Every structure is written in structure tokens, then in C-alpha cells.
Amino acid sequence: MTTTLVTDVGLLVTGAYGELPRREVSLVIEDGVIAGIDIDHPAPDQVIDAAGLTVIPGLVDGHVHPTFGEWTPAQNSIGWVHNYLHGGTTTMVSAGELHVPGLPFDDLTPDLVISLAITAKHTTGRVRPSGVKAHCGTLLLVPGLTEGDFDRLVEHNIHQLKFIFYDWNRLGDGEAQRYVEWAHERGMVVKQHSGGVSRSGSSKVAGYDVVSAVGPDVVAHISGGPIPMPAEEIRQVIDGLPEAAVEVCSSMNYRATMDTTAHLSVTGGLDRLTLGTDTPGGTGVIPRGMLRNICFLSSVCGLDPADAVAAATGNTALLHGLDVGVIAVGRPADLVFLGPVTGSAATDGLESFALGDLPGISMVLVDGEPLVTGRSEQTPPTRRPARITHPGR
Ligand SMILES: [Zn+2]
């Protein structure tokens, strides 16, 4: 067994919605899993001196568009997953592998979308690009799927489904609602593109009427991806679908995000808030996208920064049935060590978010393995770095 003791954690943000941050704690990690919080260990194999930094769970980007491994044709770039890891993202959930060159958006057949999801699941989804837990293989829902197709997807361990190119003129025939039923009978999660048309030009417009008729588990990028539904309809969706998760993405319309979070706050629904970047895509490749989302929600939209962190971690993981996103005994030790950058007026990571200052990242662990050490390649350095020592050597 490998044991790591993490000392001098200045502030621990667990990622569980509503849980208060804790000051001055230590952590014990055994074989990649959190074994204790605020306890000591007499003979660890490894000690990480957190140098008073803030420790949060690895960020969970709930809306990415992978293609193959580190390559994205959306911005014709390589290495995006590695760069996102350096922005603190340790888990990502695909919202569809729809950037594959040549994909005929207006002529998608059941055979094609099923093949695409299975291919993604057993290629990029089989390995961990740059160590990131990338959940790939999300089925793009099209007309003509059978219940047997849903069984086949489950056999391939595919649990994410997405309405984006589905023709809503068919809404009256009950097929979309049947898909949601079949999905729920199999524990699958249905995400629905909402708002106006996206970069592809082929996604379908979905306002309150369409979203409420379908009843998805996640209303994708409710505040814009990139064009949101009207503000009044956003409030109707939040009120009319109380069970649905409400997603905000980096592709957002900023004003609509302020409306969304204000309405979630007054209706006590911030535990429904889930975050993603909706990248790579027309919005770009944004390694610091999840950090910037937390900054925007905390500094402009008035959210408690711990709640914004929960939206970026625990809420999103819970929605997708993942064991990550929360720092608790028995959970994987996916951790981000961050703090204010030299020159910032902030004194800790949460204050940095509250001021809208992008924090620096010093270290990132995935399953207890330090994958980013010393400092991130994507953020400015923290004032003091976290350091690893091996007492027994
Ligand atoms: Zn998207």
C-alpha cells in the first residue's frame, strides 16, 4: 500500500454542495483513495506539503466535445486534454463526438450514431488521455432508434445520450419522450441542447415548449451555447422542470448566466447547477475554462465561491453517477492545489474566485498520482508551491 500524507492544507473545499470549507487540515491518501481527513499518519511513503494552499476536488467538465484522443478538429489543435489537466480538469464528460470531420448532421442514421458512440467509447474512452478521466461515447439521438439499440448501448457501457440534431417537428409522435423513458429504465442520462442554433448550424432550436415536452435530465447550456432561449423561458424551465439539472457552459451569454443563477438562487436550486466548457468548439480550446466559470459565478453572479466550486465538481459528478468531484473518505484522490497569484489581493483560493482573480495551480493529483507538480503550464504560479518529499528515502 502506498500512503501519502498531505500537510498544511490552508483551506479544504470538499465539492459537496452546502458543505462548509475547512481550514488548516491534513489528508491521508492510501492507494489513490482518500483514507482520512484531518488525521495524521506516522510513516507515510510520501508527504505533500500543501504550503497553505487551497485544495479543491479535480474539476469535472460536464460538457466537452472530444474527437480522437488529444486531437480536436474544431480548432485543429493537438494536446487540448493535457492543457485542460493543467487548468485543473481531471474528469470530463462528452456531450457528443460531433466534430468528426464529414459527419452529415442532416443525414444521421441510427447505424452511424451508434457506431460513432461505440467507437469513441472504445478508443478515446478506453484510455485516459494525459491521465484525465474522459468519459467518451455519447449517443447523438436521431429518429428511428429501437429499444434494442438502447440495450446494445448499455452493453457497451454507454450511459450518456444527447438531443441536439433531433428534428422537433416530430415532437408530436412521442418518439423523443419514449427515448427518455427507455433511457431512465436503463439508468442513462439524457442531455438536451437548449436555446438557439450552434456553430454547426444544424442543431435545433429548443426553448421552454420543446424542453418541457421532452423532460431531459440536463438542460444543456441553458444560458447559451452560444445563444440562450429568452430570459423568461429560462425561468420557466427552471420552475417547470424541478428535477432537471441546469447547465452553464463557457459558451455562455454572460447576461443570461446572471439571470439563470439569480433565479436558481432565489428558488433554492443552486444544487441543480452543473458546469462545463462546451469545448473544444466554436468557443475555442479553453484550458482555464472551468476556473473562469467559477470566477465568473463567484465574482459577478454573486454565488458563494464554495457553491460555484461544487457546481464545477460534486454537482456535476453526482448528475453523471461518477464517484469523483467530492473530497471524502473512500473517494478517489483527484485534487487540485491552488491559490492566489502574486499581485492578487486575495488571501486564499476561494477569495481569489470571489474577487474574479484567476487562481494559480501548483499541483494536480489524479487517483493520488501527482500529474502536475511545481506549477501548472497554464496558470500563473501560486505564491508558494506545494512540494513532495519522501521521508523514508
Ligand atoms: Zn456542446
Image (cartoon, rainbow, N blue to C red):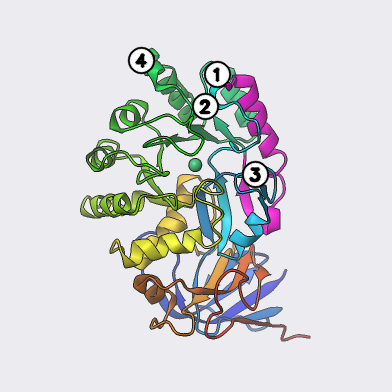
Kind of residue indicated by mark 4:
Gly
Q: For the residues marked 1 and 4, what is the alpha-carbon distance in whole angstroms?
A: 17 Å
Say whether marks 3 and 4 touch (CB < 8 Å). no
Which mark lies nearer to you, 3 or 1? 3
Rendered residue at 53%/49% (across/down): 279
210 sits to left or right of 387: left
Counting residues from the start of the chain, the first of labels 2 and 3 encountered is 3
Q: Is residue 39 above or below residue 69?
A: below
For disc 4, the marked residue is 172
Q: Up-down: is 170 above or below 272?
A: above
What amino acid is labelled 2 in the image?
A: Leu
Counting residues from the N terminus, which is met first, the one under dot 1 or under dot 4? Answer: 1
Q: Residue furthest right?
A: 393
**Image quarter of residue 215:** top left
**Element type at marker 2?**
loop
Label 1 to label 2: alpha-carbon separation? 8 Å
User: What separation in Å lies between label 3 and label 4 (alpha carbons)?
Assistant: 36 Å
Three-letter amino acid code at disc 1?
A: Leu
Location of mark 1 (residue): 145
Disc 1 crowd rating (10 Å Cα; few below 14, some 14-19, many 20+) is: some
Q: Residue 50's quadrant in the figure?
A: bottom right
What is the secondary structure assignment of the residue under circle 4?
helix
| Alpha carbon separation for disc pair 2 and 3 | 22 Å
